[in-house]
Each structure stands twice: as C-alpha cells, then as structure tokens.
Image (cartoon, rainbow, N blue to C red):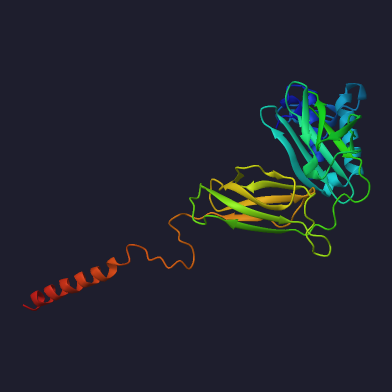
Amino acid sequence: TYRFLTLAGGDWRKVREAAILQMTYVGPPMIYYGDEVGMEGALDPDNRRTFPWNQTRWNRNLHDTYTKLGEIRRNYTALRTGSIMTLYRHNARQVYAYARFDETHRLVVAVNNSDRSQIVSIPVWPAGIGNGTRRLTDLLNGGTYAVTDGTVTLTLGAYDGAVLLDNVTGSVLPPWIDTGVEVVVSDPSIPANGRATTQIEVTPLDPAGNPLGSGQDVYMEATYGRLLDSVTETTPGTYAQRLRAPDSGGKGIVTIWVNGVKLDEEAVVTFRDPLDPGPGCGVVPPFLPLFPLLGMGLLLLLRGIVPILRR
C-alpha cells in the first residue's frame, strides 16, 4: 500500500493530525518505519525504501510531533488504558473531540480535519471538568485555556489538533459512584424501525447508599440505536427519552455517564415486531380455528370415497 504521506499528497500536516489521533485514541499505536520522518512510497516495493539515515532529509515537523506525542502517551496512563468519551463532533466543520481519563488524569483531545483554522467551543463538563479555577494545559502546542460554563474554547489550525490536560489534583474518578438504571418502555410492541419513549432513572448514591440528589452531571448517549431527544441533563432523576431502533431492529442501548464516569450498567430497550404479542399474551393465531373445519371436511370426503371403493 502507499505510505501515508504519499496518500496525503505530500501534505505533512495531515500525517501530523493522524498521529495525534493515533497516539491518544484507544488501542496500541503502530508506526511504520520512516513515517515519523516523512518517508514517501507508492505500491510495494516502493513503500519499503531504505530508511533515510541522513537527518537533513527528515521532516522535522513530523519527527518532533511523533517525539512529543510519544512522551505524552508515556507520561499519562489515561491515554493507554483509560476510558474514552466523545465530547464533540461536527461533520460539516470536520472537528472531533473526546476525553481520555482514569483514576489519575483527565485529558481532552481535539482535531480539526478541515483545510482552514477554526475556533471551536468544546463541552468538557460531561467529562467532569467544571468551571472556576480549572484550566486546561495544551501538552502538544503549549498554552492554557480556561473552562467557562463547562466549555473550553480554542483555536485549531488546519489539519491540526490539541491535547489538553486538566489541572485537577488527586483522584479524578468519584469513588462513590453506584448508580441504578431502570428502563420502562411505554409501548413494548413497536415496529423494528420505529420509536419508543423510555423512562431512564439515574440515581447516584453515596457510600452509605443514600441518593446524592442534585448537583451531579448526567450524560446519555445511544451506543446502539439513536436518541431522538436531548441526551444531556444536569441533575439526576428520571428522564423521558425517545429512542429509535437500529435499522436491524433488536435492542436499543443507551450508555450513561455520571460526573464523567461511564457506568457499567446500560439502559437496554427491546424492540419487537407488532405481530409478536410477546410471551404470555395468549393470542391465538387467526389460522388455527380453520384446523377443525379442515378435519371435518376431510372426514366427510373419506366417508364418500370409501363406499365407492367397495363397489
């Protein structure tokens, strides 16, 4: 296959953007030798050129980017084994942002896949990053950003990105999270491609098992299917959510975060075909009453045929 820089038409900025995703997203990164210094190559064997040991031929921008990203990934375990949460995505603007976090650190990664610089406001409160004195430090490019109304605003260059570190100290995962999730479907018999209104109850508890009440952040996202209403709430409670079944039917699944912590328990909605009454309904299929009539007809027919055969 073609080397990345060749596929990118020689635009090293696109390789840099890909490296930011590669080194901060889930899964182990793999760097094909020479990509980190801007080697090009078409189909095999051209993509297996000798490594350019003469450093004057290196793309220093790429080399420095890979070096810096490697240091960041090594220093923060959240980028290697932590959880991930999507914070912002905009197809038209081609901007994507997500949070990586574990018990020690919380980071926000944002990339701009367009050919122009953009000012972007990213909601970071779903990841548990609040206001006040909280500031995010750009580990890749330098600089700090304040959090206002649960949002951080920054400028992303064309085919560029940022890796922001929350300045929180100590554990960033609330140890008290013990949340129950209950789902009630208003209509259990809906078309496979239809909709259902669900009641999703989210109740964070303290270590003693008492409800914490207001002041906690609740965030919902459909991981299978599609939420048709607002997915962001600011206090625990019971929420009515309209959920569209996935195209393949089956189950709709809603993932829930509380204060930036992804819950192990998911809200699951089962979609059934309207002709399926479900277990225990006792509905007799309409063709079953025909069986006795067919049996009587067959009996009468045999009674008429037997005398003829005896003649």
- Kindly give the residue lying farthest to the front in the view shown: 214
Residue 131 seen in the current view: yes
Observer-nearest residue: 105 or 131?
Answer: 131
- Kindly give the residue lying farthest to the right in the view shown: 169
Q: Residue at x 83, y 46 (%)?
A: 101
Q: Residue at x 83, y 58 (%)?
A: 176
Residue 241 image point, x, y percent: 62, 48
Q: Residue at x 53, y 54 (%)?
A: 271
Observer-nearest residue: 6 or 272?
Answer: 272
The answer to which quarter of the image holds residue 50 is top right
Quadrant where the C terminus is found in the figure: bottom left
Left or right, 74 with respect to 222, comes to: right
Residue 171 image point, x, y percent: 90, 51
Residue 157 image point, x, y percent: 80, 24
The answer to which quarter of the image holds residue 24 is top right
Quadrant where the N terminus is found in the figure: top right
Tag count in the figure?
0
Residue 71 image point, x, y percent: 91, 38
